Amino acid sequence: MDQRIALSHASGVAAEAILEKLGETGVTPDSLILLDHGTNLGKRLSYAGAYKSSLDQQDFDLSNCSLLLMPEADDELESAALNQGCLLLSHCIQSEAAPVFVSQLSTPPEVGYTQTSLRLAGPELSCLAPVLLELNQMQTIAQLNITLMHSAEFHGRAGIDELASQTVNLLNSRSVEPVVYPQQIAFNLLPEGIDSTLQADIGHILGNNSYSIALQSVNVPIFHGLVAAVQLRFTSDIDLQGCEKRLSALDMVTVENGIVTPISDCNQSFSCLIGHLAQAADQPSNLQFWMITDPMRYGLANNYVNVTDFLLKSFL
């Protein structure tokens, strides 16, 4: 494989997850360029049995790279990739184009040779998509209610550090000064505004614009993981045991009948757990469950690597 691939913000939480998975595509250490900035510049990172030092992402010439994977927003780097002819893959870019999601159940994306960037599905959508696609194949979804509970890692290492420092300070009767979050996050819940982009992206992934969706997001004081409380209503009755069987057969998905929590079950893995799968006796067209997973690994990293692998095999 002679294509060179660059990964920006290489010491970040999302990039760390991508590096764990990327080696499965056959991208060798010699083909991978790690980029970073600030105090992380020059940091040595492990990849596929080798150690590589990160280069300056603000000065690096991307013209010799086929792809740039950009897991954190960076307007300057985005502009450089477009100007230097490097195909940009990122879930952070602003684009009206449909999000790109690649899995066993999804339709392969259409990529033109003149395309300069691809907006990838974000961590929440990448986590939800396999399960929602499978259920929508069983029976068309008519209504979808989702509450997303975001851990501190959604705000990167800065969010994790802020939760940790606030927890220590409060336990020692010291005051806290929020920086990453608008208010104290330790021992607290902070609701977020409606994500209209995510709502539209879910509809695109399902290929179903006739359903209704209610989406809520809240920041919770845990360090890692994503919890999604999902309630669905289908256009007709659906069998609970059939749902459990189909979901259990999905790659990297486990249906657990016991108690599942982000602390006990989100162990930085590339899989997810479905718990509390239930159906009221008098509501055979409804279904509800909890999804607990690592959004950076099962969600973001899996999709970045699947898209990269698809492009290397079918496009580049």
Image (cartoon, rainbow, N blue to C red):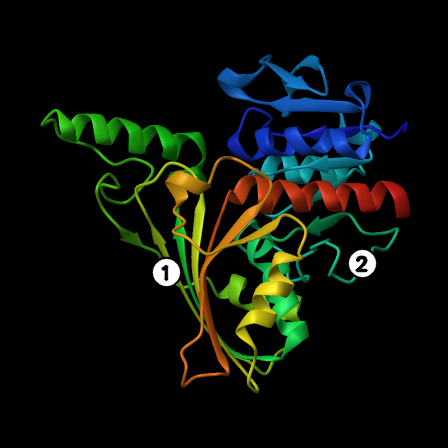
Q: Is residue 122 above or below residue 135?
A: above
Q: Quadrant of residue 151?
A: top left
Camera-near label (2 vs 1) is 2
* Three-letter residue code for mark 1: Gly
User: Label 1 neighbourhood size at 10 Å, few (<14), some (14-19), many (20+)?
Assistant: few
Q: Earlier in the sequence, mark 2 or mark 1?
A: 2
Mark 2 falls on what kind of element? loop
The residue sitting at 26% across, 41% down in the picture is: 185
Marks 2 and 1, how far apart at CA: 32 Å
Residue at position x 40%, y 78% in the image:
280
Disc assigned to residue 236: none
- The secondary structure type at the circle numbered 1 is loop
As drawn, which residue projects farthest toward the left?
A: 173
Horizontal arrangement in the rendering, residue 307 relative to residue 289 (left or right):
right
| Residue 265: x %, y % from top left | 45, 42
| Residue at the spot of label 2 | 108
Mark number, residue 193: 1
Res. 316 in view? no
Q: Position of residue 278 (x, y in %)?
A: 44, 69
Is 43 situated left or right of 257 in this image? right
Asked whether the residues under the numbered discs 2 and 1 touch, taking CB atoms below 8 Å apart as contact, a structural biologist would say no
